[in-house]
Amino acid sequence: MTKLLITGANGRMGQALIEAGNDNLNSEVVSTHDIGQDLDDALENVDVVIDFTAHHFTHEVLDAARKSNTPVVIGTTGHTDEEKAQIIAVSEQLPIVFAPNFSIGVNTLFWLTRKAVQILGNDRCDIEVTEMHHRHKIDAPSGTARRLLEILNEETNTSYEEDVAHGRVGNIGARPNREIGMHSLRGGDVVGDHTVMFAADGERIELTHKASSRMTFASGAVEAAIWLQQQPAGLYDMQDVLGLQ
């Protein structure tokens, strides 16, 4: 039985994680944490901590987890390069799962996107990515969309900084061959929609995942925590958990 600490316990995702952790037959939520509470105390007698709060809180979670030698599952997105560097550094001492999305369906989308772009390429197709989330989401593009773009950049030898176009406005001229379009939509209570489009003359292929409940992410994160308890120090993602690498 994997004993879990859930941070951000009073938030929407925190509540979903608590429910998923207690519903899983191989885990139990034994501790929670929220703003103003002592994180070191919350980590006592815990096997794994799951953090889906905010990127600026990650360093506190990592510092406390390092002191207590507790593995960490990080589902927060929007980290700066400096914050990502800290995650990588701490993973030399602790096992960490750091993933932009813990949904099994989304991780299947990652896998399918890589296979599709290997076949279609950006010489045959124009590639566009769209994502939509609820009106309260603070980072754009979403972490999931960023990962999709990373996969596309890796397979097409393009650059996020130079070849990704974030929306279009004005008299911009013809679409450059290497360009990958990225479009972020915000509104209502949308949990998360992501589409990768490959558009060619005469045909179009679209790979789409739509989430209707946060429980899909929460359940995946709990599975990752159970898996992580048995792993050596290192940096992992959900593709490792699912054996899709």
Image (tube, helix red, strand yellow):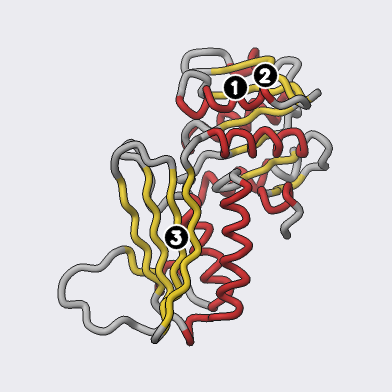
Q: Which residue is mark 2?
A: 29
**How many circles with numbers are drawn on the protein?**
3
Q: Secondary structure at mark 3?
A: strand
Find residue 139 and report its image quarter: top left
Closer mark to the observer between disc 3 and disc 1: 3
Which residue type does callout 1 highlight? Ile
Mark 2 in CB contact with mark 1 (< 8 angstroms): yes
Q: Secondary structure at mark 1?
A: helix
Give the quadrant of the N terminus: top right
Q: Earlier in the sequence, mark 2 or mark 1?
A: 1
Residues under labels 2 and 1: Cα distance?
6 Å
Q: Which residue is mark 3?
A: 195
Measured along the vertical axis of the image, is residue 30 above or below residue 220?
Answer: above
Determine crowd level at label 3: few under 14, some 14-19, many 20+ residues with C-alpha closer than 10 A.
many
Measured along the vertical axis of the image, is residue 237 above or below residue 117?
Answer: above
Which residue type does callout 3 highlight? Thr
Find residue 245 and report its image quarter: bottom right
Across and down, in percent, residue 41 comes to 65, 13
Q: Earlier in the sequence, mark 2 or mark 3?
A: 2
Q: Secondary structure at mark 2?
A: strand
Residue at the image point whose x is 31% and y is 51% from the top: 185
Across and down, in percent, residue 86 comes to 60, 44
Q: Is residue 97 left or right of residue 202?
A: right
Q: Is residue 211 left or right of residue 187?
A: right
Q: Which residue is mark 1?
A: 18
Closer mark to the observer between disc 2 and disc 3: 3
Determine crowd level at label 2: few under 14, some 14-19, many 20+ residues with C-alpha closer than 10 A.
many
Across and down, in percent, residue 46 comes to 73, 20
